[in-house]
Every structure is written in structure tokens, then in C-alpha cells.
């Protein structure tokens, strides 16, 4: 959520500890942890309860969460993730090969 909060400034992300905020957890009808209460126009519009909607495990991708929040229309999402992981593939070069592909030198 921290990554998405930085990328989707149109949306306010708020994290509470339900155990320490029983009044708010009750008002939001939070029973199962974790729960995301998706609020629009001061009313709870949707919930993401547990990890079932995100693949059933806690190591879901940022893209999965982003898509779920977009379906609830609480973030603007164009179909491609705004979270771009750094590429881990590197181009292998030999000692004599130039870094530039248009180079004639050997």
C-alpha cells in the first residue's frame, strides 16, 4: 500500500491498527484482519477482506492490489501497472563488444 499511496496521490490511504482503534473498527464493520475498507464520498463502498481476492496468500503483488483497488474505482488505473519494477535482465557483452549497438569499433 505504501508504494501505491505514493503513486496514486488522488487517493488517501490510511492505515489503522484495529486492535488499538476498536471504535473505528466497529464503525467500519471490520471483523477479519486484514481488511481494506474502500471508502468513497465518506461512505464505505467496498471491502477487501483477507487475502482471498488477492490470490489467497500474503505475498500478492502490488499489481494485484492495484487492479483490485481500480475495480472498486478508488484509484485511477489505465490497465498497466504504475508500479514498474526495476529490470533484472542485463545485456551480456564480451570484452571487445561496444556498449553502443551502432559502433563499428572492435
Image (cartoon, rainbow, N blue to C red):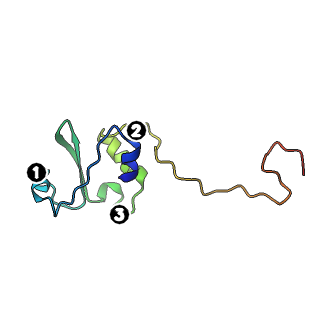
Sequence-wise first label, 1 or 2? 1
Q: Residue at x 67, y 56 (%)?
A: 90
Foreground label between 1 and 2: 1
Secondary structure at badge 1 equals helix
Q: Residue at x 9, y 55 (%)?
A: 23
Q: Contact (CB < 8 A) between labels 3 and 2?
A: no
**For residue 77, which numbered disc appears in the image?**
2
Secondary structure at badge 3 equals loop
Q: Is residue 105 left or right of residue 54?
A: right
Q: Position of residue 85 (x, y in %)?
A: 52, 52
Q: Residues within 10 Å of mark 2 (few under 14, many from 20)?
A: some
Q: Residue at x 16, y 56 (%)?
A: 30
| Label 3 to label 1: alpha-carbon separation | 25 Å
Q: Position of residue 62 (x, y in %)?
A: 41, 53
Residue occupied by mark 1: 27
| Label 1 to label 2: alpha-carbon separation | 29 Å
Quarter where residue 60 is shown: bottom left
Quarter where residue 75 is shown: top left
Is residue 7 placed above or below 23 in the rendered structure?
A: above
**For residue 58, which numbered disc appears in the image?**
3
Is residue 7 placed above or below 22 in the rendered structure?
A: above
Sequence-wise first label, 3 or 2? 3
Amino acid at each position: 500500500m505504501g508504494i501505491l499511496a505514493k503513486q496514486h496521490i488522488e487517493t488517501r490511504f490510511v492505515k489503522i491498527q484495529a486492535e488499538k482503534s476498536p471504535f473505528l473498527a466497529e464503525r467500519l464493520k471490520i471483523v477479519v484482519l486484514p481488511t481494506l475498507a474502500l471508502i468513497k464520498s465518506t461512505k464505505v463502498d467496498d471491502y477487501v477482506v483477507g487475502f482471498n481476492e488477492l490470490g489467497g496468500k500474503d505475498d500478492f503483488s502490488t499489481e494485484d492490489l492495484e487492479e483490485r483497488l481500480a475495480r472498486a474505482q478508488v484509484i485511477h488505473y489505465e490497465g498497466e501497472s504504475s508500479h514498474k519494477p526495476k529490470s533484472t535482465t542485463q545485456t551480456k557483452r564480451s570484452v571487445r563488444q561496444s556498449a553502443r549497438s551502432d559502433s563499428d569499433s572492435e
